[in-house]
Image (tube, rainbow, N blue to C red):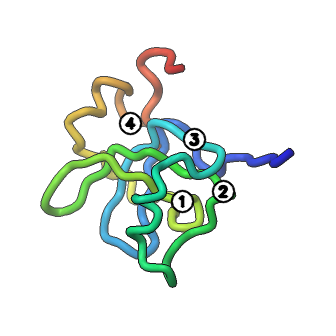
Amino acid sequence: MLKTRAKYQLGQVVRHKKHPFRGVVFDVDAVFSNTEEWYDSIPEDNRPSKDQPFYHLLAENDQSYYVAYVSEQNLLPDLSGEPVEHPDIEDFFGELRDGIYPLQTALN
């Protein structure tokens, strides 16, 4: 049995190691759970291993807000202390405190 422990928690602000975006974790998959088409769209030399946690993020960059799906190996904690401005954050979380957005309601 595969045992995986997520490094980042729900509500935590993280940033991508290689791409200029950051976001708030709103869900975690213990292992890859997206489509093969999505996985195959990543250039082969950049494809992450499937047997690690993958994070659903309310993400932002300089131009837009979106939902991102990112492997744990490609994330770092965001230590800026700056809030994420994604418009859906208030649907899930309270006010940012010490780099974490507390959950507003219980999630399944």
Whether residue 9 can be seen here: yes
Pointer 3 residue: 9
Q: Position of residue 10 (x, y in %)?
A: 52, 36
Pointer 2 residue: 52
In the image, what residue occupies the spot 52% across and 73% down?
A: 47
Pointer 1 residue: 71
In front: mark 3 or mark 2?
2
In front: mark 4 or mark 1?
1
| Marked residue nearer the N-terminal end (3 or 1) | 3
Of residue 96 and residue 39, the one placed in the foreground of this image is 39
In front: mark 4 or mark 3?
3
Mark 4 is on which residue type?
A: Leu
In the image, what residue occupies the spot 46% across and 72% down?
A: 17
Q: Does residue 97 appear to the left or right of 85 in the view shown?
A: right
| Secondary element at tag 2 | loop
Mark 2 is on which residue type?
A: Gln
